[in-house]
Amino acid sequence: MFGNFIYFIVALLIYSTYQPAEQTNFSPLDSLLLFVSLALFFFIVSRRQFSRIARLAADRAPQGLLDQQFSSALTRQSILAIGLFAVDIYALNLPTWITGIALFDAIPTIGALLFLALFIAYLSMVWANAYDAYRLIYRSRITRNAYVASNITFSVPILLPWLLFSGLADLIMAFPFELPRRMLASPIGEITYFFIFLIVAAVLAPLIVQKFWRCRPLETGDDRRRIEAVCRRARIKVADILRWPLFEGRMITAGVMGLIGRFRYILVTEALLRILSPEEIEAVIAHEIGHVKRRHLMFYLLFLLGFSIIAFSTYSIAGYLIILSDSLYRLIFMTGIDLLSFITGVRNAAIILIFIVYFRYVFGYFMRNFERQADAYVYRLFDSARPLISTFYKIAVASGNPADKPNWHHFSIRQRIDFLNHCEVNPSCIRQHDRKVRISLAIWAALMIVLGTAGYHLNFGQVGERLNARVLESAISKAISIGGEHDAGLYLMLGDLYFSRDSYAQAVAAYRSALALEPDNAIVLNNYAWLLATSKDPAIRNPAQALVYSRKAAAIDPSAQVLDTLAESLYLNGRIEAAIETAKQALEKANANRSYYNGQLEKFQAARETPIGK
């Protein structure tokens, strides 16, 4: 079940890291045919694989073999669904189909929801095909629709915080309010918004999720009174105790969610209340209370922040490795792959891979050990964990899974039973495990501090600026030397880099090389004109020549940025009225950073009263 969380988050990363291509790999008709063909092929492969397992189950193959084959097939097909989704996004360029549509351009989250629905459709194919095998192997009476719906409703809430986060950001950017848009567009503003939203979502999400899961309050009776008594004994506050209709309530399980008591819920399934004895129900609730008392829910949020820190810190490394690799560079130019697109693709793939490894091994490690801590918390409320041990035996029998089946986010049932048996004999095992968890958390926190500090310096500090500049210069020079000498874009990038470092003579040489290759390149003309107009070096500064180049650039591309350069050139040449009119045109076309364009217009208007040089 928890594996579905990973699948949904990876799908979200695949979509969110995609940059729309200027030129698609296939025509719209070819893309549509390939899309339908691949989806049909995926459905057939999935159906055949699970049909084979269902036949084995009908022939009464060993339970252990069936369980292993079913779990493996479910994992393989889910991963294949991710691969198919990635092909749809990156190879077929399906997101480009909605580019240019006003609704999707104004609120990108709607487009993301559309494609995430496509991914859910792929997984639904897997679950629908897996149903017959699932029913025979685990002797379940759940219907096919309920089985698919339970998988969806259990997993989809992981996307709700992102949906609210992204949707609210889209609305902020869509509203005509400059200050919040400017704040959200800045790195500090984006980070601040993320942290504030994360805290609010962490507090309020349980209220939304329990509605999404169609939970309902547990009616007054012995079971409710017993659970409430355990909560009072542990001195924890809960908003409610809810029936959890997970797989129609047929799983023997419970859960707890919520950081604060006002929005904290304890969830129990029908099977748990029906199959377990009163003492076993109390033990299970004590386990869930252990998660609260040990603040595991808060740590899970910190671990999610940890992934953000890792991604933030390592995003540039993939680009550096590509840039510094001669063999990769030669491959890129031999195949004609766009350099920036290749670097972006590798960086995005690295982020997805880091997430999978981090969630599977780091997050999984702490989840297993937190579960063991919650198991041991039973001893804080009761003298023995025997009822919890007997519960584990019942879960193994009811699920049809072997007790020693490995579990990446829990220890196996056998391992959990053995641990509790050791604690029955030697209570010091509990203290030893708590110490292990504390040490692990301290190591993780230290690594996050180191990575966060390194990431800050790489992305915002002077060290990062110098390193990025040197690496980029090396990359561009290398690209020119091994086949890019006829690429005006490379010389443009090199000129912009030199300009940013105040290496004006080198910037002039690079811009001139670019213009020799593409005399009508508006970007080169504009950037070269801005250099000639604003250079701090008197030997380079040439307002008259800047006006010539900026006029030519504006005739080709009258965008806000180009018009601003023309206005500055007119201003420096004493053409104040023309500069004002041009600045007004630039302001009208500006969709962002309007405060800058306003400042330029005010500067030119002020020059009416105080001419340049007076």
Image (tube, helix red, strand yellow):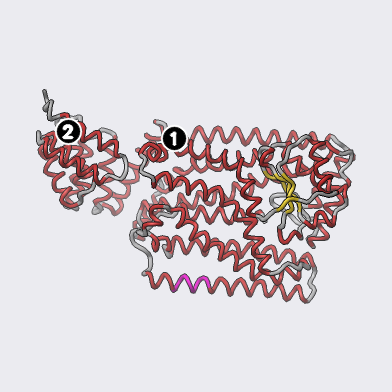
Q: Residues within 10 Å of mark 2 (few under 14, many from 20)?
A: many
Which of the 4 image quarters holds residue 148? bottom right
Q: Main secondary structure of the magenta part?
A: helix
Residue highlighted by disc 2: 604
Badge 1 density bin: few <14, some 14–19, many ≥20, Cα 10 Å? few
**Image quadrant where one finds the N terminus:** bottom right
Q: Earlier in the sequence, mark 1 or mark 2?
A: 1
Residue 318 on the magenta segment:
no
Identify the amino acid type marked 2. Phe
Over which residues does the magenta segment extend?
A: 33-39
Residue 529 found in image quarter: top left
Q: Is residue 19 above or below residue 33?
A: above
Q: Nearer the viewer, residue 456 or 99?
A: 99
Nearer to us in this view, 318 or 556:
556
Percent position (x, y) of residue 175?
A: 38, 45
Q: CA distance from mark 1 to mark 2?
A: 32 Å
